[in-house]
Image (cartoon, rainbow, N blue to C red):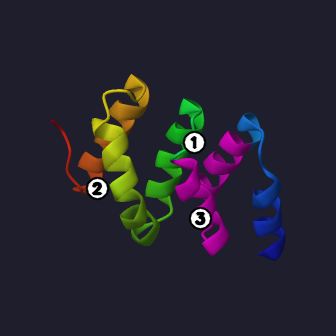
């Protein structure tokens, strides 16, 4: 898993970050490095990275999701946030029973 964490530290290009988030979410592979990468990606300025990070955070299980909920809640309610990001954040919070839906 050290190799995975090393790869994540070097992953800076948006298409690579998106593909990485989608892959870890689909496979449910969770390490502290993957969780950190996913949670930090929720604050990325790129809306597609945020979208992939929301999916990934939810897919990685309740521990990661509970850490993500405060950030995802902000994404769901921030009027300056992209509409797609807000809608997905709201939907994932509803699915998980974690609130929003205004």
Quadrant of the frame with the C terminus: top left
Kindly report the distance in space between the C-alpha atoms of the residues bearing marks 3 and 2.
Answer: 20 Å
* Magenta region, residue range: 17-42
Q: 22 or 84: nearer the eye? A: 84
The crowding category of the residue bearing disc 3, from other C-alpha atoms within 10 Å (few below 14, some 14 to 19, many at least 20), is: some
Which mark is on residue 55?
none
Quick check: can you spot residue 92?
no
Q: Tag 1 or tag 3, which sits nearer the N-term? A: 3
The residue wearing badge 1 is 44
Q: Position of residue 81 (x, y in %)?
A: 40, 30
The crowding category of the residue bearing disc 1, from other C-alpha atoms within 10 Å (few below 14, some 14 to 19, many at least 20), is: some
The residue wearing badge 2 is 96
Q: Is residue 83 left or right of residue 22?
A: left
Q: Is residue 56 left or right of residue 87?
A: right
Q: Quadrant of residue 86?
A: top left
Which mark is on residue 36?
3
Quadrant of the frame with the N terminus: bottom right
Extreme front residue here? 80
């Amino acid at each position: 898993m050290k190799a995975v964490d090393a790869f994540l530290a070097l992953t800076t290009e948006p298409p690579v970050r998106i593909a990485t988030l989608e892959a870890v979410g689909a496979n449910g592979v969770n390490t502290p490095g993957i969780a950190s990468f996913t949670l930090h990606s929720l604050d990325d300025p790129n809306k597609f990275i945020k979208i992939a990070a929301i999916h990934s955070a939810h897919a990685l299980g309740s521990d990661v999701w509970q850490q993500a909920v405060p950030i995802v809640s902000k994404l769901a309610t921030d009027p300056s946030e992209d509409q797609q990001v807000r809608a997905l954040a709201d939907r994932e919070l509803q699915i998980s029973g974690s609130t929003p839906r205004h």
